Image: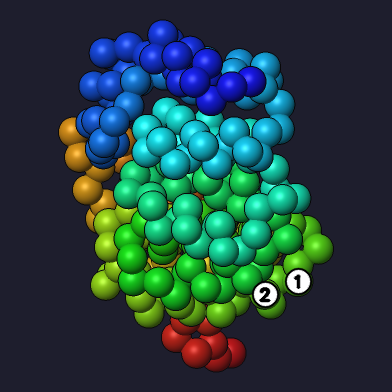
Amino acid sequence: MRFEDVMKQLEHFGSARNRAVYARHGARGPMFGVSFATLDILRKDIGTDHGLAEKLWESGNIDARMLATMVADAARVDGKQLEKWVHDIDYYVLADAFVKNLVSKTRFVRAKLRRWTKSDNEWIGRAGWQLCARLAVDDRTLPDAFFEPFLRTIQSRIDASKNRAREAMNNALIAIGLRSSMLEIEALGVAQAIGPVEIDHGQTSCQTPDAAQYILMARGRTKKGPAWHFAGRARKGGGG
């Protein structure tokens, strides 16, 4: 499908209502306001087309960039291109789509995870920590020990991190805590140490989940349960 034809379709399916909603969530720059459902229909029509994806991304249009993450070829993209794209991002929804639809499917997952979680840039950090959360949920080949350094980083850096990166660190903390019983205990200790995480969600009704409560609820426990008890002891250095 030609780039010009796709852009015409995006413009046709856009709406003022969606533009207003996306703007409230922090979208800036040119956009048509295409629904996610319509983008998915277009993805199915287009299939994988890396050349088109590159043109869509270079347009700078938010809807086009969202679609680019969906039709790009994870086997063709290289590390340099991923770096260029992540540096273009200034919108958390696009960062999340970039991670979910493209980065997580490439051979660069672990390298980008380590690199981007070290970044002080809000959006690069966001991408890195969302990638961490995705691996914690999806990649069962990794040992639990792989995620332990990230828990320590969350505990030491979350308060000083920028808004949307901080939100993604909280997401990663939850995802790691849900991975296994041992990581649950460690994640609960981190959650207890850092306390509630404050996120500015702008002009939206979104709320930040309490990591400890979410982990305990999802794993069918309560704050009186054994995991929470041992998490507190572990954080204080244990003891019999």
Disc ID at residue 146 = 2
Q: Residues within 10 Å of mark 1 (few under 14, many from 20)?
A: few
Front in this rendered view, residue 194 or 67 = 67
Q: Is residue 237 above or below residue 226?
A: below
Of the numbered discs in the image, which one, if any, rests on residue 143? 1
Q: Residue 68 or 6: which is nearer the viewer? A: 6
Examine the rendering and report whether any part of residue 83 can be seen.
Answer: yes
Residue at 52% over, 73% down: 115
Identity of the residue drawn at 49% across and 20% down: 4
- Image x and y of residue 116, in percent: 48, 68
Q: Residue furthest left?
A: 203
Query: Which quadrant of the structure image shows residue 10?
Result: top left
> Which mark, residue 224?
none
Under circle 2, the secondary element is helix
Q: Amino acid at mark 2?
A: Phe
Q: Position of residue 177 (x, y in %)?
A: 58, 61
Q: Residue furthest top?
A: 12
> Which secondary structure, mark 1?
loop
Q: Is residue 55 left or right of residue 31?
A: right
For the residue pair 23 and 195, the one nearer the viewer reads as: 23
- Mark 1–mark 2 contact, CB under 8 Å? yes
Say few, some or many: other residues with alpha carbon within 10 Å of mark 2 (under 14 / 14 to 19 / 20 or more): few
228 relative position to 168: left or right: right
Instruction: Quarter of the image for the N terminus: give it.
Output: top right
Q: Residue at x 81, y 63 (%)?
A: 141
Q: Position of residue 31 (x, y in %)?
A: 32, 27
Real-space Cα separation, disc 1 to disc 2, in angstroms:
6 Å
Q: Quadrant of the C terminus?
A: bottom right
Residue type, mark 1 in image? Pro
Residue 32 percent location from the top left of the image: 34, 20
**On the rendered structure, is 195 left or right of 81?**
left
